[in-house]
Amino acid sequence: MFLAVRPNLVRLAAGASTVLISAALSLVPAAAQPVGPNDSDWAGKWVFMVGSQALDLHELNARSADAGFSPFSEKLLSLGGGGWAVKDRFVIGGNGHALIAGQEASGALRASLSGGYGQIDVGYQVVRTGPFTLTPTVGVGAGGMSLALSEMPGPASFDDFLVDPPAGSQVSSWGFVLDGALSAEMSFRLSDPAADGGHEGGLTAGLRLGYALSPADWSWVEVSGGPDFAVTGAYLRLMLGGWVR
């Protein structure tokens, strides 16, 4: 399936991720103390994430099929990032993700589905052994999805396209999201605290398995009578980033 990303939604998700990362890292004191034997100092970490998000698109696909469109895949590509502050095993921060379903055609029309959501979450490192941590988190946030219809242009020159572009329309929905996740990570030190004034940092990599649940169906903005729809489903994401304390 050809993947089509709506640029405004991707910029929105990327902007939300940047804000959440900055907010989480702002909780880390600028003048951190040397790392002690109790490992109780503030730390900050940030990661990029890529993976797959499952969504229930049954009713949306059924309504679209009545108009001649092929069904959208219920496994969406997920691209995003997050940042967290860590203190005495407690974790607080946030993450944001763009969700990309792709596009389907019906006659001269093309339908594209994409969106995203962001959230604030808290957690606790239930396992911390050497470089390995296991952290369950719970989060709350909001997001939106967009269904866009556009005419598929016939053969034309680029100049003709600029003068007479194909018409298009878009409807969107929004709602709240609850989230529960379990992250398994390995962290690797790249700097020596003794040589860096007590500071240290490195790389972190891991997997994040979770489930997003919307407490109610999302509201359609531009139209009434839309199909029941919400971001609800399991996801698996690969994480790669860094940490400092």
Image (cartoon, rainbow, N blue to C red):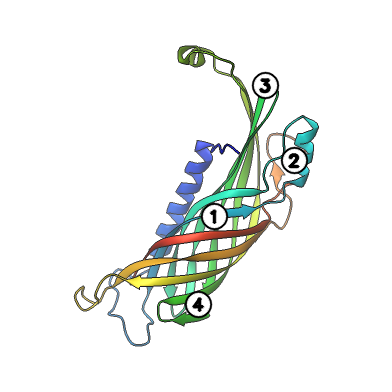
Name the foreground residue: 204 vs 82.
204
SS type, badge 1: strand
- The label shown at residue 125 is 4
Q: Earlier in the sequence, mark 2 or mark 1?
A: 1
SS label for mark 2 = helix
* Mark 2 vs 1: CB contact within 8 A: no
Question: In the rendered structure, are the residues bearing label 2 and label 3 in contact, judged by CB atoms less than 8 Å apart?
Answer: no
Q: Which residue is mark 1?
A: 51
Q: Horizontal placement of 9 versus 22: left or right?
A: right
Q: Earlier in the sequence, mark 1 or mark 3?
A: 1
**Picture layout, residue 119 above or below residue 218:** below
**Alpha carbon distance from label 2 to label 4:** 40 Å
Name the kind of residue labelled 2 in the image.
Answer: Asn
Circle 2/circle 4 CB separation < 8 Å: no
Out of 222 and 82, give the one closest to the viewer.
82
First in sequence: mark 2 vs mark 4: 2
Residue 75's place in the image compared with 170, above or below, is: below
Dot 4 and dot 3 residues touching (CB under 8 Å):
no
**Label 1 CA crowd tier, 10 Å (few <14, some 14–19, many 20+):** many
Count the marks: 4
Q: Which mark is residue 61?
A: 2
Q: Tell me where residue 34 appears, x and y as whole percent.
A: 27, 80
Residue at the spot 49% in from the left edge and 52% down from the top edge: 80
Q: Earlier in the sequence, mark 2 or mark 3?
A: 2
Q: Give the CA separation, mark 2 to mark 1.
A: 22 Å
Residue found 46% across the figure and 16% down from its top:
158
